[in-house]
Amino acid sequence: MTVAINAKSLTRHAPLGGAALGQLFHGARTHNAFLDRPVPESLLREALDLAKMGPTAANQQPLRVVFLRSSAAKERLRPAMAPGNVDKTMAAPVVAIAGYDLEFYEHLPFLTPQRDFKSLFAGNPELAARSAAQSGTLQVGYFILALRALGLDAGPMGGFDAAKVEAEFFPEGKIKANVVINIGYGDDAKLFPRNPRLTFDQMATFL
């Protein structure tokens, strides 16, 4: 009996090699300083297109991003940043404000046409907010990995005043600020030593 083998499926499930894992994880670092090198808009677009392919609850895709590229745009963010994050953010080639849309459910008839998820979330603001925060944060992680996959570096930060960011960049009130990410080509000469990580046994249990 001959079993047909799908070459595409074999490729999709093949483990990544050491170089790819190094670029995404082992050798990747959180950067606080970047080279004086412009970031092509095409790479930012491609990174977001990759990030949207990751799973979210009910395919809700609540991530919303504002890219700040000009000095004037970044100055609008300055008052909201924690003091220790101001200089590196102003100097970054690109700053991404990643938020999540509390009204993501308006897109669900298109994103998940096989089931009526819109009524589930639209009628329950607490559930919608919790789900948007969860899936929006997942998408931030996908986005950082996508940036790394395309040869860029990232410096994600939570040190900012979310209310000020929302008032300045999301004044309509339906998008919540989640993470600010500095993006560019990292300056390895200015990296801090890598901090330790927990062991597997400190993080996980088999039952």
Image (cartoon, rainbow, N blue to C red):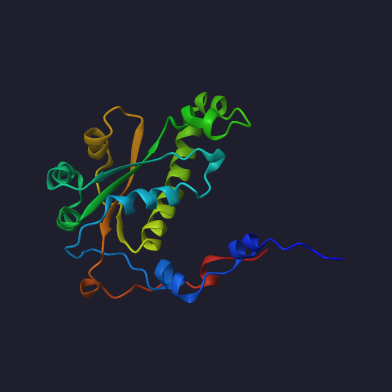
Image coordinates of residue 144 in percent, x first then y, are 38, 56
- Tell me if residue 154 comes above or below residue 99 in the rendering: below
Residue drawn where x is 20% and y is 51% of the image: 82
Residue drawn where x is 22% and y is 38% of the image: 164
Between 77 and 54, the residue placed more toward the observer is 54
Count the numbered circles shown: 0
Horizontal side of residue 58 vs 198, given as left or right: right
Q: Quadrant of residue 152?
A: bottom left
Image coordinates of residue 77 in percent, x first then y, are 19, 44
Residue drawn where x is 43% and y is 44% of the image: 136
Q: In which quarter of the image is residue 190?
A: bottom left
Q: In which quarter of the image is the C terminus?
A: bottom right
- Tell me if residue 33 comes above or below residue 69 in the rendering: below
Image coordinates of residue 117 in percent, x first then y, are 57, 30
Horizontal side of residue 179 vs 14, given as left or right: left
Hey, which residue is sitting farthest right in the picture?
1
Between 120 and 41, the residue placed more toward the observer is 41
Q: Quadrant of the N terminus?
A: bottom right
Between 148 and 62, the residue placed more toward the observer is 148
Horizontal side of residue 193 vs 73, given as left or right: right
Image coordinates of residue 68 in percent, x first then y, are 22, 46
